[in-house]
Amino acid sequence: MNLTILSVCLLFAAIVGSGCAQNGGCPDVSVVYHDSCYFFGYKQPMTFLDADNFCRTQHHGRLVEIGTPEENAFVKNYLSRLSHTENFWLGMTDQANEHDWRWHSSDDVVEFFDWAPGDPDNTNTNEDCVVFWYERGFQWADVPCPSFKAEPVCEKSISDITEIIG
């Protein structure tokens, strides 16, 4: 959103108490699904903690938290249309307790899973983070958090954006 449009949106918000919405309320560089904006870290592989930091600082969001089969299908479909072959981070981990999968940003228990066959396998007992695995049709696989590099998928609630704008 350019500065002129942002100024008009802020003025409009101050006068009528409602913000402007573009792309369903999401920034132009994101993809909208239901009540969230999704940002795909195109060609930026990084570790889990770097990806988490990227989502928080660059998009004021979090690594994606998949709650339903429909949301999972939406993200997998989008990833499959990208023109490169990378793995992508989800925001889940079992670092605190093995096989107790939780969302990193909230510590909420993960209730939906889409594991690839044979996963989670915790190879060498240090695979505590999860990616959409390219070679397995973007089903989920556990990988080592500190050494594995993948691209972030960031998610931000549209309500978080409308609170900022108006």
Image (tube, rainbow, N blue to C red):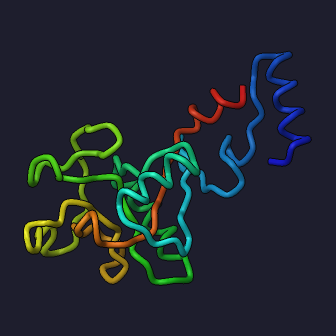
Query: Is residue 8 positioned above or below 98 on the image?
Result: above
Give the total of numbered labels. Answer: 0
Looking at the figure, which quarter contains the C terminus? top right
Q: Position of residue 68 (x, y in %)?
A: 34, 49
Given residues 112 and 1, the one toward you in this image is 1
Which quadrant would residue 139 be assigned to in this image? bottom left
Residue at screen point 14% across, 66% down? 126
Q: Position of residue 27 (x, y in %)?
A: 69, 49
Q: Is residue 140 left or right of residue 8?
A: left
Residue at screen point 80% across, 23% down? 13
Query: Is residue 132 positioned above or below 8 on the image?
Result: below
Q: Is residue 65 left or right of residue 53?
A: left
Can residue 34 be seen here? The reply is no
Can residue 99 be seen here? The reply is yes
Given residues 38 and 128, the one toward you in this image is 128
Q: Is residue 140 left or right of residue 121?
A: right
Q: Position of residue 66 (x, y in %)?
A: 36, 51
Q: Position of residue 161 (x, y in %)?
A: 62, 35
Which quadrant would residue 10 be assigned to in this image? top right
Q: Is residue 27 left or right of residue 102?
A: right
Residue at screen point 57% across, 33% down? 160
Residue at screen point 25% across, 60% down? 129
Query: Is residue 12 positioned above or below 27 on the image?
Result: above
